[in-house]
Amino acid sequence: MTEDQEQQIRRQNLAFFGAITASVSHELSNVVTIINELSGMLGDMLDATDKGKELDNEKLRRLQQRLANQIPRADGIIKRLNRFAHTSDQPVMAYDANAAIGNLIDLAQRLASLKRVKIEGALCNDVASVEGSPFMMLNAVYLCLKQAIESASEGDTIAVATMCDKTELTISMRSSGGAHDGNELPYESLVSSLVDKLGGTLTLSSSSGESRYAISLPRSARK
Amino acid sequence: MSPLRILVVDDEEELVFTLAERLQFRGFDAVGVSSGAEAIRASDAGEFDVVVLDVKMPGMSGLETMQAIKRSRPVTRIILMTGHGSLQDGEEGLALGAFDYLVKPVNIDMLVAKINAAMGTAG
């Protein structure tokens, strides 16, 4: 691998971390905005009672419930970010690729939803233990997802699947937009470099208007 | 004098309906919708004095929605809502004809002040 490619990977790793944390900060900001309005509504109700209006206990209970609903939502967002952040703990580690990819799919849904596109995961049931860098693997998968989202049309679904055998894990993504016509895709060389670094292979293909991305990675013997 | 008609638009339903209710509490005739397409339909169906519009929405963005509303109802005042990381969207909105923008979470008193200012300049 050339120094240029190494540098590209370092830049992309930082860009990937930035893209995910920016997206999560938007999601958390939405929760804070809702809490702001609901607590403001409570204030409005109290102001009204100060002016002699009777306190509506039923409305108060509903408001409390609506506020409480934001707690598991925020908790879920924070847990996803925390799981993602720990994928960069060590350059090489044993990890469950299915759990990491499942988490990435959840994190990438916001990006997809802005284009009214859905990401659906069909991950193998087995614990897919791999030795390597989960962060770089996710970076490669994310770039494929980003490519698929950018070329998808409103209402499309991007399917992500994993298949495992004793020696290899294959992550495949299928999207109805942006059929691969033989020309290099915008993120192709970056994904290729990342997958090379992981000791795997990248295959791009298209048929019947569908694009397919497949990343095959060596799998550790450990389970 | 009839109350000002306000349309609140955001893909977060919990936010949009709460904000509309809080504006009603302050004497406005406010309703909420949760997409750009719904906002355009609502604007075409009834005249709103001010549209309070989120910039980042799935599908049709706030800026696209604003331009569509402005095409059919040029006098409607638009106040955009942006996130902390999207201030440039707010600035872009101003360049495209928004009256003003606010950063979320929105301070209700500031929003009311901007709505009144928007109508003060409406002549």
Image: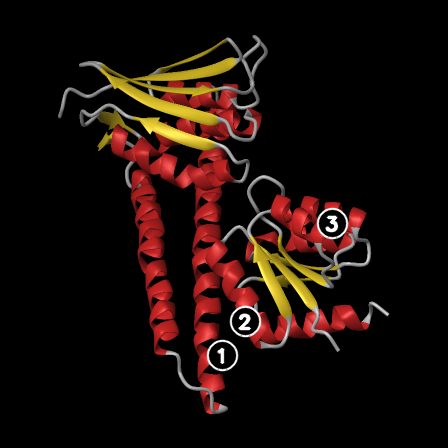
In the shown orientation, is residue B55 left or right of residue A32? right
Secondary structure beneath label 1: helix
Up-down: is A61 above or below B71?
Answer: below
- Residue A15 visible here: no
> Residue A44, labelled with which disc?
1
Between A184 and B76, the one lying in front of the other is B76
Whole-Å distance between the Cαs marked 3 and 1?
A: 31 Å
Residue A181 position in % (x across, y down): 57, 9
Up-down: is A213 above or below A90?
Answer: above
At label 1, the amino acid type is: Asp
| Crowding at mark 1 (Cα within 10 Å: few <14, some 14-19, many 20+) | some
**Dot 2 corresponds to which residue?**
B22
In the shown orientation, is residue A202 left or right of residue B2? left
Secondary structure beneath label 2: helix
In the shown orientation, is residue B49 left or right of residue A153? right
**Dot 3 corresponds to which residue?**
B69
Q: Residue at x 45, y 80 (%)?
A: A45
Q: Residue at x 38, y 69 (%)?
A: A63
Q: Do the numbered discs 1 and 2 sit on residues whose CB atoms are within 8 Å?
A: yes
Whole-Å distance between the Cαs marked 3 and 2?
A: 24 Å
Chain at numbered mark 2: B
Answer with mark 3 or mark 2, whichever residue precedes in sequence.
2
Which quadrant of the view contains residue B107? bottom right
